[in-house]
Image (cartoon, helix red, strand yellow):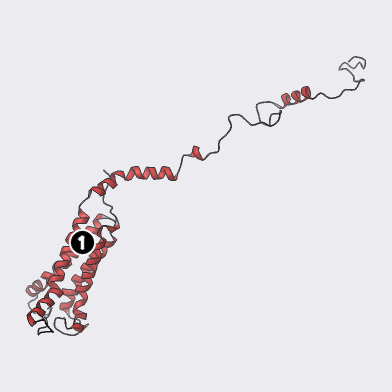
Amino acid sequence: MVSVTRIPRSRGGVTGVLLMILGAWGGLIPFVGPYFHYAYTPDTAWHYTSGRLYLSIVPGAAALIGGLLAVLASHRAVGVLGALLAALGGGWFILGGPIIALAVKSGSISPGRPLAGAVGSLSSATRVFLESLGFFTGTGMLIVFLAALALGRFSVVSVRDAALADEGPGLSLAADAAAFPAAEENLPEQAPFPATTGEFPVAGSQYSATEQTTTTQEEYPTTTSPFRRSPSGDPGQL
C-alpha cells in the first residue's frame, strides 16, 4: 500500500471553521463584552490587562491558528498538529485561571471577576454563570470537543483513503496513457511500397534511370528516316 498521508482539504473544513470562530470569540469577548454588559472586571471595552492577554488572547489565538491549519491541511500531519494546538488552547481556557492563580502568587495576572447583578429576567447568579461559561469554561469545552473530533478525523485512515491510495498508481498510469498516446498512433500511415503515377516509376524507386530510359524507348519508338544509317555506317543497310 502506498502512503496515505495526503488527505482532501475538505477533511477538516467544518471543524476547522468552528474552531476559528470559537478562538476569535474567546480572544475578543473580554474586549467587546462590556458593550453588552457581559464582561469581567474591569468593565471597560478594549481595556488591556495581562490577565486578558494570557487567559484569553493566547488560548484564543491557539484555537484560531489550529482551526486554520485544519482547514488548509492537505497532509495528515498538518491536520493533526492543528487539532492538537486547538485542543491545548481549549484546555487553557478551562484550566488557565486556576493554574495562573497557583503559579503567580502576586495576583498580577488575573481574569478579573464576572459582573454581578440582575439584568432583565436574569438573576445575578445566572448572569455570573453565563459569563463564566462564555468567557472560559464553556468556550474551552467546545474547543476541546471540536479539536478531538478533528484529531480523530485526521489520525484515522478510512477505508476510502486506503482504496484511493491503492488505486492511485493505476489511475496515474491510465491518465498518462490517455494524455500521451503511443508514438505509433500519432504517425501517419505509410504505404508498404513507393507510390507511382502513370506507367513510369517515380524517382527514387527500385528501378534505375537506365531501365526507365529503355522502357521509354521500347514503348514509344521514334520515327526513323528511310535514309537512316546503320550502326556500321552503311546507308543502305537498315
Q: Is residue 163 above or below residue 23?
A: above
**Residue at the (25%, 55%) spot, across then down:** 76
Crowding near the residue tagged with mark 1, few <14, some 14–19, many ≥20 C-alpha atoms within 10 Å: many
Residue under pointer 1: 83
**Residue at the (23%, 72%) spot, across then down:** 24
Q: Is residue 112 above or below residue 6?
A: below
Horizontal side, residue 175 vs residue 116: left or right: right
Give x and y (percent) for residue 14: 25, 62
Horizontal side, residue 124 vs residue 173: left or right: left
Nearer to the camera, 183 or 37: 37
Q: Is residue 30 above or below residue 228?
A: below
**Residue at the (21%, 67%) spot, across then down:** 63
SS at circle 1: helix
Give x and y (percent) for residue 205: 66, 29
**Residue at the (16%, 70%) spot, across then down:** 139
Q: Quadrant of residue 178?
A: top left
Quadrant for the N terminus, please. Answer: top left
Horizontal side, residue 231 vs residue 81: left or right: right
Give x and y (percent) for residue 32: 21, 80
Q: Quadrant of residue 66?
A: bottom left
Give x and y (percent) for residue 7: 28, 54
- Total numbered badges shown on the rendered structure: 1
